[in-house]
Image (cartoon, rainbow, N blue to C red):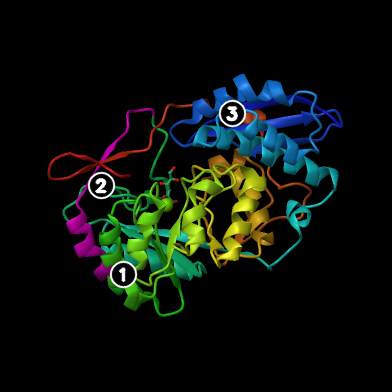
Amino acid sequence: MKITAARVIVCSPGRNFVTLKIETDQGVTGIGDATLNGRELSVVSYLEDHVIPCLMGRDPQQIEDIWQYLYKGAYWRRGPVTMSAIAAVDTALWDIKAKMANMPLYQLLGGRSRTGVMVYGHANGRDTAETVDEVLRHKEEGYLAIRAQSGVPGLNKVYGVSGHHGASRMYEPADGNLPSEHDWSTEKYLRHTPGLFEAVREAVGPDVHLLHDVHHRLTPIEAGQLGKALEPVRMFWMEDPTPAENQDAFQWIRHHTTTPIAVGEIFNSIWDCKTLIEKQLIDYIRTTVVHAGGITHLRRIADLASLYQVRTGCHGATDLSPVCMGAALHFDTWVPNFGVQEFMPHSEEMLSVFPHDYRFERGMMYCGESPGHGVDIDEKLAAKYPYQRAYLPVNRLQHDGTLWNW
Ligand code: KDG
Ligand code: MG
C-alpha cells in the first residue's frame, strides 16, 4: 500500500481550521486536524513545504515508523508547529488503518473501556448571578461536569467571558484584527473567585462536578491560596493554575492544597509533563490529539500517566476542529485512565463543513461506529470559507500595563 497524495485544506467557517487529507493507491483516504490557533499558516507551511514530500510513496500502514521518521528525522524535535503537523499525519494514518480494517478507531486501540465519554461544558457569565444561571442551564441540559468562568468586578475583559451575554461560547473569533487586549488584577480575581464558587455550589447542589480554568495567571503560592480557599466547594479540578514551563513549581501548589490540578492543553510532548506526572504534581493531563503528536504520542503520555494515577482530560475548545474531537472521542472511549473530555460545541456552520458521526446526549458524548475516526471534510463547502488572519488575545496588568500570562 502506498501514499499517493496529501494536501492541506484551510477553511474558516467562523474560525480557522487546518486539515490534512492523505490519499492512497487503494482509494482509502484519511484526515487529520492540524489547527494551531493564531499560528495556523505556520503549520500549513511545515506540512506543505517539509512533511508532505517525505510522505509520498510510503506505506501508510507503518504509522509508528512514519511518526519516528517525522520526529527524529527532522533533528529539530518537539514544539507546537512540528507536533501539530506530526499529529495531523498520525491522525490521518490511524483513520486510514481503521478504515482498511473496517473498524471504528477505538477498536484498533484496544476496544471499548466505557459506555460513553463524560464531557464538561462551559458556563460563562459576566458576574456571579449570570454564571450561576449558566451553570444551572447546563445542569438542565444533563451535564454532569461544568466549568464555570465569570467576569471579575473592576476588570474589563476576562478570559472566557464575552462582553455580551450568550456570545461567550465563541470567545476568540477569527476576526482578522491584531490581538485584542484583556486586563488583569490577581488581587481582584482572588477576592472574587471563592465567593463565586460558593454561590455556584450552593445553587447546583453536591453532585455536579465543578471545574475552573485559571489560564496560567497565578504564581504557585497564589494558586496554593486559591486551591485552599476552594477546598470546601470540592472542585473536580483547578486548571492551569500557573505557567508550567517550570514543572517543579507545582510542588508549591501541592504543599498548600488538595484541590485537584489539571494541566497540559498547550503541551506538545511527553517531556512537557514528565516531571509533573512522575512527581504526582497533577491529577489530570490535558494534552490533545492535535497538539501532542496525534494518537500515537497521546497514547504514550496516557500510559505514563496511568502509572501515577493521573487521568486524562483532553482539551476540547472550538479552536480544535471536529476532526480532533472525533479522534479524541475514540481515544477517550478506549483509554483506561480516562477522566473527562472538554466539550465546547462547534457552530452549525463549522459542523456542516465536517460531516461526523459523534453525538452529545445528556452530558455524555459518543463516538460513532463507522470505520475510521468518523469525521470527514466537505471540501467544496470548505472552499467557501477562506482563511482569515486571527489571533488569541493578550493580557496586561491593569495598574501598569505589564504584559501578563494569557
Ligand atoms: O486556543 C486557546 C484556547 O483553546 C484556550 O484558551 C481554551 O483554555 C482553554 C480551554 O480550557 O478550553
Ligand atoms: Mg484551558
Q: Callout 3: helix, strand or loop?
A: loop
Residue drawn at point x = 12 percent, y = 45 percent:
399
Identify the element where label 2 is drawn.
Answer: loop
Is residue 246 visible from the viewing direction of this image? yes
Left or right? Give the position of 277 relative to 63.
left
Q: Mark 2 or mark 3, which is nearer to you?
A: 3
Residue 293 falls left or right of residue 202? right
Q: Residue at x 26, y 66 (%)?
A: 225
Q: Is residue 324 magenta?
A: no
The image shows residue 303 at horizontal and vertical percentages of: 63, 58
Q: Position of residue 84 (x, y in %)?
A: 56, 37
* CB-based contact (under 8 Å), mark 1 and mark 3: no
Tell me whether the residue at label 2 lies in contact with that at label 3, contact meaning CB atoms closer than 8 angstroms: no
- The mark nearer the N terminus, 1 or 3, is 3
Which residue: 45% across, 74% down? 208
Neighbours of disc 3 within 10 Å: few (<14), some (14-19), many (20+): few
- Spatial distance from mark 1 to mark 2, Cα to Cα? 29 Å
Amino acid type, callout 1: His
Residues at circles 1 and 2 in contact by the CB criterion of under 8 Å: no
Q: Earlier in the sequence, mark 2 or mark 3?
A: 3
Q: Earlier in the sequence, mark 1 or mark 2?
A: 2
Of residue 272 and residue 320, the one placed in the foreground of this image is 272
Say which mark, if any, is on residue 75. 3
Q: Position of residue 165 (x, y in %)?
A: 32, 53
Q: Residue lying furthest bottom in this view?
A: 206
Q: Which residue is mark 1?
A: 256
Q: Is residue 31 visible?
A: no
Nearer the observer, 134 or 185:
185
Q: Is residue 27 left or right of residue 294?
A: right
Q: Which residues are magenta?
A: 176-196
Residue that numbered label 2 is attached to = 157
- Residue 182: name its quadrant: top left
